[in-house]
Amino acid sequence: MTQDATFRPEARNPRGFQDKRARDLRIERHILESVAKVYERYGFEALDTGAFEYADALGKFLPDSDRPNEGVFALQDDDEQWMALRYDLTAPLARFVAQNPEGLAKPFRRYAFGPVWRNEKPGPGRFREFIQCDADTVGSARPEADAEIVALAVEGLMATGLKRGQAILKINNRKLLNGLLTSAGVQSEGQKLGVLRAVDKLDRLGPDGVRLLLGEGRKDESGAFTKGAGLNAKAAEQVLAFVAAGGGSRSEVLNTLAGVVGGSAEGDEGLAELAKIDAALNSLGVGEDQAAFEPSVVRGLEYYTGPVFEAELLIETVGEKGEVLRFGSIGGGGRYDDLVARFTGERVPATGFSFGVSRLAAALRAAGQASVSEPRGPVVVIVFDQDSMDQYFAVVGELRQAGIAAEVYLGASGMKAQMKYADRRMAPAVVIMGGDEIAAGTVTVKDLDLGRQMAAGITDNSQWREGRPGQVTVPRSELVGVLRKIVEG
């Protein structure tokens, strides 16, 4: 093959996957570290499970097929079992609990974070790989366990840099709607699921659109028809009255809901659970502006069995055309008492919350609230003479031992290009050691941080700038002290 015919692949990302540089990673790391401290203060234990699970453990496979569906990334192991990359952190938890029935203190309180993968069509802000952060309690059926998860989520999100009033946890209970539908004569699980899917579109379609989906169905602007849940007009209005019951204090919403769903056994049970959650949230100091009862929240996953939660970001930003943009849902969760039973056949109560770290990081950046400093590079030791490399590496080794990030320039360019390199790396300073400095046992330090401030015309940091010469030559023994002042300044 001639050189001209050599295959050269196009440099490109797979669709739905993104590259992240230091700035993005620092924000995500800050979020995870801040939230982990809150979770551990609540007594939750860290747990990390592998990236792959057996596909049947995830529950993502097609009936009568030996090939997992397109919702996950799957491969066949050498023993012909199908494995898939985890699509969330909850299914692996259920497998872990079922696999360790005797080795865990119950309730088992765990938190986890890490990447998950979904083989879905990517779009704006929708990736096939993203980071989730979860907290779950397994082994407690008490509504207070749900309340603690809500309080944990509220405090965890605020620890990331959100201000009070910029996010709210919305709470509902699946048992309320189930009780309402039972009273209305709805029996089939398929019809109940159709109602849940219709209600889940309330924000996007409004009451009129949901009314159509609760009935025979709805035709969208493109002419495509979505089959409805098939409720009669009276039952559809009951559902709409139910989802419209929010908007007041938690106690006010409970009173309104009691008039809508009270009287059915399951509905009364759901009301009693929400009342206990409200009492616990009040004791934990979680305000009405931080966690609210919202009947329109149903969550999309079918495995929720009781209370459900959804975290909504209220941050507003302005788009390129001046339009107001809201980030909306950032995560959610709820009670899922049937998930472990897939493995054991025995019902194990569980409740948890999960939020998307990458989406939250994007929201904090857009709102200018990513409370981490810009990434800084290392101190760069300039290379004048290849024969003096031992001197340069001795300096860089001394700086690293002192806890100062440092590197020797290992390119092939001259002094000017090396200075440009250090500036692009956001180095706080460079160390210059020519033949004269080496012979005299001195080093020259150039303060790049000061130079950037002066170049930017920053005038409100005069105290910081006083006593900071842009360039200074000092004895080699004083180098660490000089650089530490610059780096820590």
Image: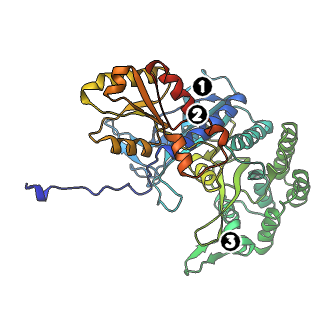
Question: Marks 3 and 1: in contact by CB < 8 Å?
Answer: no
Lower position in the chain sequence, tag 2 or tag 3: 3
Quarter of the image where the N terminus is located: bottom left
Quarter of the image where the C terminus is located: top right
Q: Residue at x 34, y 56 (%)?
A: 12
- The residue nearer to you, when weighing 419 against 170, is 419
**Residue 273 in the figure: left or right of residue 155:** right
Label 1 SS: loop
> In the rendered structure, which amino acid carries the disc numbered 1?
Pro
Whether residue 375 is visible, yes or no, is no
Q: Quadrant of residue 213?
A: bottom right
Dot 3 crowding, Cα within 10 Å, few <14, some 14–19, many 20+: some
In this rendering, the label closer to the viewer, 2 or 3: 3
Q: Report, in whole angstroms, how far the alpha carbon at label 2 lies from the one at label 1.
A: 10 Å
Q: Residue at x 73, y 38 (%)?
A: 152
Label 3 SS: helix
Question: Whole-percent x and y of residue 153?
Answer: 71, 42
What mark, if any, has residue 344 been given in the picture? 2
Residue 239 against residue 331 in the figure, above or below: below
Question: Whole-percent x and y of residue 116?
Answer: 50, 45
> In the rendered structure, which amino acid carries the disc numbered 3?
Leu
What mark, if any, has residue 101 been given in the picture? 1
Question: Whole-percent x and y of residue 318?
Answer: 64, 65
> In the rendered structure, which amino acid carries the disc numbered 2?
Thr
Lower position in the chain sequence, tag 1 or tag 3: 1
Q: Report, in whole angstroms, how far the alpha carbon at label 2 lies from the one at label 3.
A: 40 Å
Question: Marks 1 and 2: in contact by CB < 8 Å?
Answer: yes
In this rendering, the label closer to the viewer, 1 or 3: 3
Dot 2 crowding, Cα within 10 Å, few <14, some 14–19, many 20+: some
Q: Which residue carries the number 3 mark?
A: 205
Whether residue 90 is visible, yes or no, is yes
